[in-house]
Amino acid sequence: MIRFFTRERFGRPQFIAFFLLLAFLAQAAWLIHSELHVPHLPGVDGTSASEQVRIAAGWRQLHGGALAGAPYPGPPGALPTEIPEDHGFDTEQSPLISLLTAAPLLAWPQRLLDSESSQYWRWLPRLPFLACGAFLGASLWYVARRLCGKAGGFLALTLYCFSPSMIQASAVWHTEPEVVVAWGAFGAIFTAIAVAHTLYAPREVVLWNWRRIILLGVSLAIAVGSQFSMVVVVPLALAFLLYLAPIRRGAAFSIWIAAVLLALALLFATYFFHPHAFVLGMRHASFWGATWRSFTVPGVYRQVGLQTLRACPALAVLLPVAIITYVLWARTRYFGNTAPGTVALLFIGLGMAHPHVAGAGYLLASVPFLLIFVSGVIADLMETSSRLLVTACVWGLVAAYVLWSVLALAEVPHG
């Protein structure tokens, strides 16, 4: 126990990161409070139609009823437009999101699930997504600190913790819960990278990596279960495994197969192990659906640019600086910067190619990778002879960004 509580695990950097994540959760909680607390409108709880559908569908499944989205009950066309369906089957996601939404309500007395107390129990369906946002932030900091050093890690985490899009997604504030997609994709890619690096250890690699195999399988299940079209992370994880471990490709492929089988079993579990419903759900699932026509529409590029800047307004300055530096300075073109930058670019491209519901998930999933790329390049600039000037400019910009984000959040109206 004493060996676990070491300064490396619980030192000053960890406490600073912890308080940044607390600030992130506080901002998301304020958004939830603002949405659910609607004054002078009795009987109105402020939740969206799609969230109500998820709660009802997940509640039915948890109590032995019909599976969520496989199919939804009711007449055709009765579902909100945010939920794409084909003959009642959800084409974008498995029952995972509905189960996550409804599961916390099991802790609330059923007789008190009424409109009069809704301002209290309506918090419960948001808790899993708040947790996903916090876990994604913690994962981002852990990865960025290892790839970019201490300064880069704190830069990435600060940009994340005051990102309007990430706060909104974690609070599910007038949006869909794409934060689960982002967390699953991030975990899948960087777990695959971590597994590949351990393959050089002088041990029986497949058995030794059982923890990371489980983590990779869970990440893949979360990513694909929350958005079917995020299945692209499955071959992407294999590509990183094979690229980073060229002399252990047999072991890498075996690990990938084991993780994919585990992910498939976990995805089957979200259907409560009903094979017929699972097969029908997969048959109606939209694992692709991209249209390359979007790349010929100038308005799509403008919209994607606005979404990226909305995710983190500080990127208006930091991203051009990082790209120019990466192109001109060979020192920054190493794997720790190139890999997240490439994945971010891929997800942005896929977001453009999916102009409907799935596009938002890809664009949000690109944000953590984009933050690591920017933080890595900026951290390299902080190590040059002009480090004092660069550091002062960067943290001055970050301070202004944090202040802007907090002031904008304070102006959010109720309801």
Image (cartoon, rainbow, N blue to C red):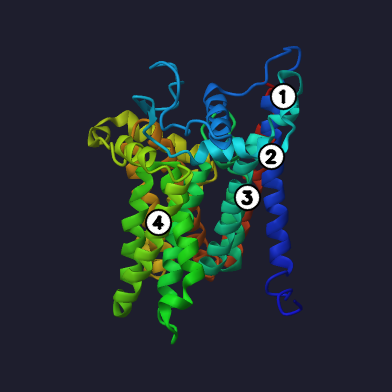
Spot occupied by residue 139 in the image (x, y as percentages of width and height): 56, 58
Q: 31 and 328: which one is in front?
A: 31
Real-space CA distance between mark 1 and mark 2, rounded to the nearest whole angstrom: 21 Å
Real-space CA distance between mark 4 and mark 3, rounded to the nearest whole angstrom: 22 Å
Real-space CA distance between mark 3 and mark 2, rounded to the nearest whole angstrom: 12 Å
Label whose residue precedes the other's in the sequence (4 or 2): 2
Label number found at residue 341:
4
Closest to the camera, between mark 4 and mark 3, is: 3
Q: Which residue is mark 1?
A: 118
Spot occupied by residue 285 in the image (x, y as percentages of width and height): 33, 37
Quadrant of the frame with the C terminus? top right
Task: State the SS at label 3.
Answer: helix
The residue most toward the bottom is 202
Real-space CA distance between mark 4 and mark 2, rounded to the nearest whole angstrom: 28 Å
Q: Residues within 10 Å of mark 1 (few under 14, many from 20)?
A: some
Label number found at residue 134:
3
Q: Quadrant of residue 249?
A: bottom left
Tell me if residue 35 comes above or below residue 371 in the rendering.
above
